[in-house]
Image: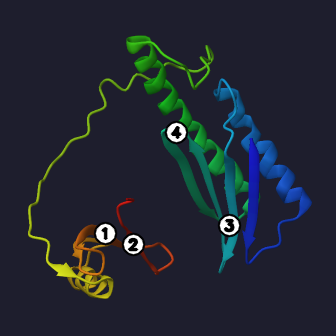
Amino acid sequence: MKYTIRGKNLEVTEALRDYVQKRLGRLEKYFEAPPTSDVTVTLSVVRDSQNVEVTIPLTGGILRAEVKGGDMYASIDLVTEKLERQIRKLKTKANRKIREMGGMRTFKEDPKLPDMHDEDEQFELVRTKRFTLKPMNVEEAILQMNMVGHNFFVFSNSESAEEVNVVYKRNDGTYGLIEPAN
């Protein structure tokens, strides 16, 4: 895997870079062939919090994990464990589909890992809401979101031919916008 490691409010030392590559390198054993796209790692310090964010683009999906902690090295360990759990879950689902339909494998079979059957896993939908999307701009949508006290808001964007968009509040207190790709 190729790594893009950057620091925010932090100088990425050679020791830190080596540690990230060593820890995340453990994930390669789960793949038939390591991902060819860049693994993006962002190390940041915000107040007393040591944050590690890792994004691994895969064919047909993305693996992403973020950990905030008191120690950078411990945060790197925790984010690696989080990604391992995600990969195991994906591996189980992907390999099951492959067995059912046949096709190219992405993840290696690992006899040491328990076969994590998610057949009992159900996604329980407990509520469905329907509402009319009022055309508004992004600033209006953020105001509406804050007024209702939610951390996201779905709206019809009057600035982009009334496409359905979503504004959301990020962990750092800023806002994000999700819009459809054309």
User: How far, Cα to Cα, is label 2 from label 3?
Assistant: 30 Å
Contact check, label 2 and label 3, Cβ < 8 Å? no
Q: Nearer the viewer, mark 2 or mark 4?
A: 2
Contact check, label 2 and label 4, Cβ < 8 Å? no
Q: Which of the marked residues, 3 or 4, is nearer the chain's N terminus?
A: 3
Q: Is residue 175 left or right of residue 125?
A: right
The part of the image, by quadrant, that contains residue 96 is top left
Residue for badge 1? 166
Residue for badge 4? 86
- Image point (31%, 31%), residue name: 121
Could you say where residue 159 lies in the image, as x and y percent from the top left? 29, 81
User: How far, Cα to Cα, is label 1 from label 2?
Assistant: 6 Å
Residue for badge 3? 70
Q: Is residue 92 left or right of residue 69?
A: left
- Which secondary structure lies at badge 1? strand
Q: Is residue 125 left or right of residue 131?
A: right
Q: Quadrant of the C terminus?
A: bottom left
Picture layout, residue 30 above or below residue 150: above
Could you say where residue 104 lies in the image, as x and y percent from the top left? 53, 19
Q: Which of the marked residues, 4 or 1, is nearer the chain's N terminus?
A: 4
Q: Nearer the viewer, mark 1 or mark 3?
A: 1
Q: Which of the marked residues, 2 or 4, is nearer the chain's N terminus?
A: 4
Residue for badge 2? 177
- Image point (62%, 18%), residue name: 110
Q: How many marks?
A: 4
